[in-house]
Image: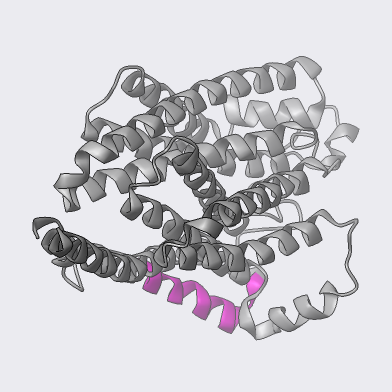
Amino acid sequence: MKVSSNVASKPLIDGWTILFFIMAAIGLYGMAHVFFYGQEPSYGVTRYVSWGLLIIGYSFLVGITTGLSLLVIMCHLFGLKHVQLMERKLILLALTALLGGFYVIFWDLGGPFKLQILRFVVNYFPPHITSAIWWMSTLYALELPIIILEIYLVFTKNHKWLLPIAIISFLVGVSAYSNMGFVFAANISRPFWFGAYIPIFFILSALGLGAGFGLILCYFTKRLVPSLEDKLATVSHVLERTLFFVVLAMMFFTGWRFGTALYTYQPEVSGAAIALLWGKLSFYFWFFQIFLGLIVPFFMLIKKPSNTGALIAAILVIIGIFFERYNTVIAGQLVPVNSVYYDKVFYVNYTPSLSEISLFISALGVAGLLYLIGDRILNKKFAQEVETEESSH
């Protein structure tokens, strides 16, 4: 009965609940600012830098969903599906991260004060199949009910349909996320984004996000249910190796990307690369993306780390991926298109406003709160199942 008592004994309100609630409430500042002053004065975006922190936050959160969907497939392919509690947590976090992404993009579109939902429905039909953004919206609209169905099948232990639905969820998620990369990559007016690099890198970073959050869930699940540590050790090892190879691949891609950008001497491309290497974004690039996000985790993961070491490496990779996304999206807009008509490349400025920051933090808080609510239900059900299994023996 020890396992079930440990799982079910978590208090309804703990430090995590309070933290995520405060984070969610911080968004009230941004909401109020948008309500009273409108989007233009509230957000730091301009006609030059039109995609800011909220778009970046959206791509970051839905990337978590895609990565975790991949991990669920890996749990089946590597024969790890017997760790039911872990599988449920992965799918639950995939759902709440997706809802957090919808939350933050909703505010980027203008919030409820401009009836964005109605406008979306009106413009949804007839299908705009030549629009990359239309496909992205459609695929993510499909992914939400599929993940909900997947959670239902996991909770009801319907293993007959779980694997095919999980595969469909993964395929839709990968298609949606790579298509989001294509929204950037097809934008020929932003040469730093243009090409096949970003869609591939989006999927690679999604795998890193999935492995990183998977390791975090493993760490806290081991603390919650110590008797599962032996089973979760196999899961943790797979995730650690996955994260290590993601870090290696990101180093390789990053090196070649910047080597190519500087070699071409195309003003918008080399200018954006210079802004990252020794310009306006250099601190974000070298400290957060390269040092914290790649170099430190590389040395931590090259040998089998401790549970705490794996947790720290996972958190650092997640931070690095977020700043990689921030750096790529912002750097691609800092050099105006008309720079080619000047002798010297000139840059515009972008700084996230307090409203954008508050809404992004709020999205993280909302996703965290939703996960905690689902996790309490999950733990209670898992404890009941364990008690039933133990009593039958």
Q: Measuring 70% from the left and 44% from the top, which residue is drawn there? A: 178
Q: Measuring 63% from the left and 67% from the top, which residue is drawn there? A: 108
Instruction: State the residue in front, 3 or 281.
Output: 3
For residue 33, side relative to residue 194 (left or right): left
Residue 91 in the image, given as x and y percentages of width and height: 45, 56
Instruction: State the residue in front, 146 or 247.
Output: 146
Please tell me whether residue 164 belongs to the stretch shown in magenta. no
Please tell me whether residue 37 belongs to the stretch shown in magenta. yes
Q: Measuring 77% from the left and 49% from the top, which residue is drawn there? A: 183
Residue 278, can we see it?
A: no
Q: Measuring 22% from the left and 28% from the top, which residue is drawn there? A: 306
User: In the image as oriented, which residue stretches furthest toward the front?
Assistant: 393
User: Total of numbered circles in the picture?
Assistant: 0
Q: Quadrant of residue 188?
A: top right
Give the residues drawn in magenta, as a range.
23-39
Instruction: State the residue in front, 215 or 352.
Output: 215
- The image shows residue 272, relative to residue 368, as above or below, that is above
Residue 334 in the image, given as x and y percentages of width and height: 70, 41
Residue 114, can we see it?
A: yes
Residue 373 in the image, given as x and y percentages of width and height: 33, 71
Residue 310 in the image, given as x and y percentages of width and height: 30, 32
Q: Quadrant of residue 268?
A: top right
Looking at the magenta stretch, what is its main secondary structure?
helix
Instruction: State the residue in front, 378 or 346.
Output: 378
For residue 108, side relative to residue 247 (left or right): right
Chosen colour scheme? one colour
- The image shows residue 248, relative to residue 313, as above or below, that is above
Quadrant (top left, top right, bottom left, bottom right) of the N terminus: bottom left
For residue 158, side relative to residue 297 (left or right): right
